Image (spheres, rainbow, N blue to C red):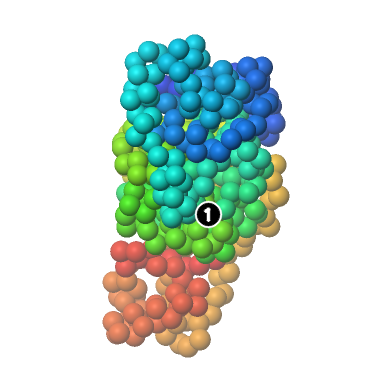
Amino acid sequence: MQTHLNLYLMQIPKVRRDVFRNSRPTDRITGTRLDLILYTLLGFMSTPIRENPLYLHSFNLLPQFGPTRLFKLANHFENDFERAFKASKHELIKAGLENEVVDAWLEKKPKINLNVEKSLMENEGIGIIAQNDVNYPKLLLEIPKFPVLLYYRGIMENADELCFAVVGTRNIATYGRSVIPDLVAPLVQAGAVIVSGMAFGVDSEAHKQALIKGKRTIAVLGGGLDNKSLYPKHHQLLAQEILDNGGALLSEYPPLTPNFKQHFVARNRIISGMSIGTLVVECDLKSGSLITAKHALEQNRQVYAVPGPIYAEMSKGPNNLIKMGAKAVTEANDILEDLNLKSLPEEVENQNIFGDNPVENKLLEIINKEPIIINEIIKSSGLDVGEVTSALTFLEMKGKIRNLGGQQYIRSR
């Protein structure tokens, strides 16, 4: 089954295959990566960055400096990026950089003012984590071409924290909205830090489950972390709630970087790479969420998917993943047990939830775990529209029902 899943995901943009494909999920996070061994032998992992990370940041301002070229600089200059910053053309070419890249860098360098860069990041509350820092996510170090540096806002202090990715479509359906609380909230309760991309739909709903529980969550973005570049704009409030709740915003792109489409593909490898597993909730067959699933496989992480109706467009992606070997998830314990985490007591739906008055009791007899629209509630109850809408508002405030949007309601557990 795993082989079929690999073949299916090979149709998505190419990423290098991994050597530990058949290992158990718990083995995957403890096994030493070939890439990590190689980089350690080269020497750059063992030498701390000696000077201000702004010198490393300065190279990242040139788009041509991706992980591969930054690795070359780190190796040649033994992580002394100040020396690399001041190096001659001959030295940079000797480090393994192409002539045209060196020319572009030498043209760019005189325009870089490190004091201005420092002030910009301080004003925006942006920090830098280099790959040698103690708070750089350890799981991320195991993936191919991990980011040499990360920009962050918020708190990034625990390199060993247990992260779990939840991804899916921006065009989330009622089904997705109804299952996310039941699947994600228990993971949060068990201590997992939810990682996603803060996009509309599944991403934002996953982040909100952590916020509801008062727990931290991490959003990985495809552009700069400054307020001007923050994307999507409509999620400025969500971003602030993440920060206020002890969470973090992450990006490998420097401040003022626009959110180009190709950045999201690269961003997805970080979401899966810093996570012990990835859950795909809803998506169609062309969704970027399948790229995240592919990255997860390449990184030797487990892929989980939520099965859905066979004719639903947004269930085709997860259903295909399951057919090809991903683990089907119908309850949070499917994930917790698979990853050898503490399982939660099996939840039993309380069929005898009572309201505080006859109207509330009547509505609770009608509303169950299947979404029902308000018109059906009014028709089935025989009550006036005003009575129903008022009672629904109070029941929602009391946590006895959930509003899924689109005037659809389900009962809370």
Please provide percent x and percent y for residue 407.
32, 68
Above/below status of 34 relative to 265: above
> Left or right: 99 with respect to 179?
left
Query: Quadrant location of residue 38?
Result: top right
Please provide percent x and percent y for residue 136.
60, 39
User: Is any atom of residue 3 visible in this view?
Assistant: no
Which residue is at 57% across, 21% downward?
A: 77
Above/below status of 241 relative to 160: below
Which residue is at 68% across, 57% downward?
A: 345
Please provide percent x and percent y for residue 213.
56, 63
Q: Count all numbered tags in the image, as a single digit.
A: 1
Q: Which residue is denoted by mark 1 in the rendering?
A: 154
Nearer-the-camera pick, 248 or 304 = 248
Residue type, label 1: Gly
Which image quarter is the C terminus in? bottom right
Above/below status of 99 relative to 107: above
Please provide percent x and percent y for residue 239.
43, 57
Query: Quadrant location of residue 114?
Result: top left
Above/below status of 409 relative to 267: below
Which residue is at 68% across, 26% downward?
A: 46
Nearer-the-camera pick, 383 or 339 = 339
